[in-house]
Every structure is written in structure tokens, then in C-alpha cells.
Amino acid sequence: MSSVNKEIHLLEYVDLLVQHRWMIIRNMVLVAVIAVIVAFLLPKKYTATATLMPPQEQEKMSMTQALSDLSVPGISLPTPASYSEIMAEILKSRSVNVRVIQRRFFSRSDSLPLYRILDFDNKDQALLYMPQITRFIVTNEGIIKISVTLRDAGLAADVANAFVEELDRVNQKKSVSRAKNSRLYIESQLRQTDQKLDQATKALAEFQREHKAVSLEEQTKASILQAGELKGEILAKELQIGVMLQTMKRRNPLVIRAQRELNELLQQYKQLQSGKDLDDSNEVIPSLNQVPGLGTELAELMREVKIQETVWQLLNQQYYQTKIQEARDTPTVQVLDAATAPVIPSSPRKKAIVIVFTLLSFILSILWAFVLHYRQSLEQRPEEKQRWNKIITALHSDINTFRQKTKNLFSRIKQ
């Protein structure tokens, strides 16, 4: 019996839809025509995309690399942001966006700043609008995509490529600034070391002339040379830490590691001075304190010359490296695909608009058919109709009360 009732109810629904079929078809056609007209009247927008390769390993920042290499037992460190994500944040920065907004582009048969092309009075207003027309996406592979959506296809491509140029400019500026600070610091240390080396060389030559070139035993000479090299490495390591502190904090993992290496060199130098090995159980080589009288003075002079020579060589090598880094003008970003003017607009999606609105009108028309059928059936159920009338009357009363209170409030405000 229940199955028969279900079939009857379903047949009633189908019959209801058939009765109102022309109304449903009329609404669908009307809405479809309106949707087609609206889709063609909506302004076309084009999206141009520039694609950047992920940065190479040697271009990664030292802080990011150091944090990635850290391994602390029992402590899980957060994964540092990739360099591609950092570059995407630079693209979103105010400084980059302001420079793009102020750049001049060819539009409307004239060269105008971007904010004027976008019909804004100043760059601050255009700056608030930029997130609506730009997107910066970093894929899982680290590839950076710069997308710009505008009504002019050529302008969209030019703006996307302008973001690439501004990103490269910012990276070069920061890199050159760090290299310049390092170069100036090394220059001052190199001048001081050159003076010390000249003084040490003259003092050794004067001592050898006065004392007829006093010589030491081969083992003692090896000790002196080793001590000189260690001292030179100590000074070079101190210099390296000084260079690092120009751009890093003392808590930086690289600075801590360099300080640990310096402490090890100081410990070795102290052991060489005392002539003891790590266990202090037997003498490895004679200490410099054991070289008597005149030999000790000669050893000090030779060691000082060796120290200054070692430091000068290391400083000179680092100096030319920083000069090369400062003079480098190669691009810091690698463009995989430059943005080109798209041929097909990205919006509006005409087919989607027509299909969605037509389906929506079909659904709403079916609902309206059921509403009409329900209103007609109320004539046969007076009690239910009366309840609906009470509900409608109550709603009208609430609406009238709200209007009256609103009117009184406005009248009080005007007084």
C-alpha cells in the first residue's frame, strides 16, 4: 500500500511540473538570454603570468641554511621558510609595490604611472587595490608564479615583468650593501696588518744584522713556525667573526660555530706554548719558553712576521672576494617564462555564467510552481489558510511598528 501511495505522490509532482512547464521554460529562456547579455556586457580581464625558477643552493641565505643543518637532541625546531617563500613575501612588500605603482607604462597612447592608468589619484589608493589584481604563488617545487589581472592584456604582461625586475633590484641592492660593509671592514684591517707586517719585517732584519743572523735548532724552528701559523689562524678567525658580526647577531648559529673554532685554536696555541699535549702527560715539542735568551727574542720576531704574513694573505684573499661580490651585477632571479600578453580573457567566464544562472532559474521556477500549487490548495483548507493569515498579519504589524520607531528616531535626531 505504501509503494502505491509513493507512486501516486510522485505522479502528482510530475503532473504539477507538466502543468507549469511553460512557465518553467519561459523563465529559463528569459534568464538564459539575460545571462548571455550580461556576460557579453561585462568587461573583459586578462591574466598575464611570469614564472621564476627556484633559487640555486649557493643563493640561499646563510641563516636559512644554518637552521636547516641544526640538529638538537630532544628538540624539534620549526622548519624555516624556503627562499622561494621569502622572495614571494618580498614581492608583496610595500617597497616593491610602490615602485611598480610609480613606474610608467604605455597606455591610452601615452606613458603614464600605473596608479594613473588604474584611475587612482595617488599611489596610496592604488596600493590598497594591488592585492586585488596581483597573485604570488609558490609551488611545491619552489617555482614562483607572478600573476597580474587587468583589462589591458599588454599592460598586465608589462606589470608582471615589472615585478620581476623590482624583485631583482631589491635582491641586488641588499647583496651589494652587505658586500660593501664587509669590504670596508676588511680594508681597514688590511691596512693595519700591512703596517704591522712592515714593522715586524724591519725589526727582524735589524735584529739579524745586529746579532749576525742567530739560528735555532730545527725542532725549535718548527715550533716557532707552527705557533706563527696558529696565531695567524686565530687572528684570521677573529677577523672572520668581526666580518660576520657586521650582518649577523652573536646568537647566530654561524657566529657560535666560528667562536667555537676560535676557542679550539686558542687551546692549541696554549698547549704549544706550554709544550704539552692534550693529556699533559709528555712533551711533544720544546715550548718557546724553553728557548734561552737570544734565541727567544729571535723566535718572537720570526713568529710575529709569520703571523702578519698569514693574516695578510687571508685578508687579501677575502678582500678580493668581497670586491667581486660587490661588483657583481648578474640577475639574482632566474626567469623561466616571462609574462606575455594573453589572447584569451580570464574573465568573465561566459559559459559558466549562462549555465549557472539557467540552472538556478530552473530550480527557482520549480520551487515557485510548488508555491503556486500550495496557495491554490489552501482554498480547500480554510483553517490552515487562517493560520497563515494570522502569521502574515503579525509580520505586517511588526514591520509597521519598526517603521514607526525608526521614523520617531530620525525625527528626534533632526530636532
Image (spheres, helix red, strand yellow):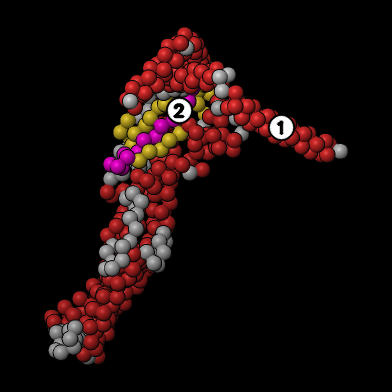
Seen from the viewer's position, the closer of residues 122 and 263 is 122
Query: Which residue matches tag 1?
Result: 397
Which residue is located at x 63 percent, y 27 percent? 386
Of the residues tagged 1 and 2, which is closer to the observer? 1
Q: Number of labelled discs?
A: 2
**Quarter in which the N terminus is drawn:** top left
**Picture coordinates of residue 172 (x, y %)?**
40, 45
**Picture coordinates of residue 139 (x, y %)?**
32, 40
Q: Is residue 141 highlighted in magenta?
A: yes
**Picture coordinates of residue 305 (x, y %)?**
28, 73
Query: Which residue matches tag 2?
Result: 149
> Which residues are drawn in magenta?
139-156
Which residue is located at x 49 percent, y 20 percent? 370
Seen from the viewer's position, the closer of residues 343 and 330 is 343
Seen from the viewer's position, the closer of residues 221 and 405 is 405
Q: Is residue 55 highlighted in magenta?
A: no
Which residue is located at x 23 percent, y 83 percent? 271
Seen from the viewer's position, the closer of residues 20 and 45 is 20
- The amino acid beneath tag 2 is Thr
Q: Residue furthest right?
A: 415
In the visual, does 41 lie left or right of 135? right
Q: Marks 1 and 2: CB-CB under 8 Å? A: no
* Disc on res. 30: none
Q: Circle 2 — which element?
A: strand
In the visual, does 13 lie left or right of 401? left
Which residue is located at x 39 percent, y 67 percent? 251
**Picture coordinates of residue 329 (x, y %)?**
36, 42
Quarter of the rendering containing residue 344: top left
Quarter of the rendering containing residue 376: top right
- The amino acid beneath tag 1 is Ser
- Vertical placement of residue 261 versus 178, above or below: below
User: Crowding near pointer 2: few (<14 within 10 Å), some, many (20+)?
Assistant: many
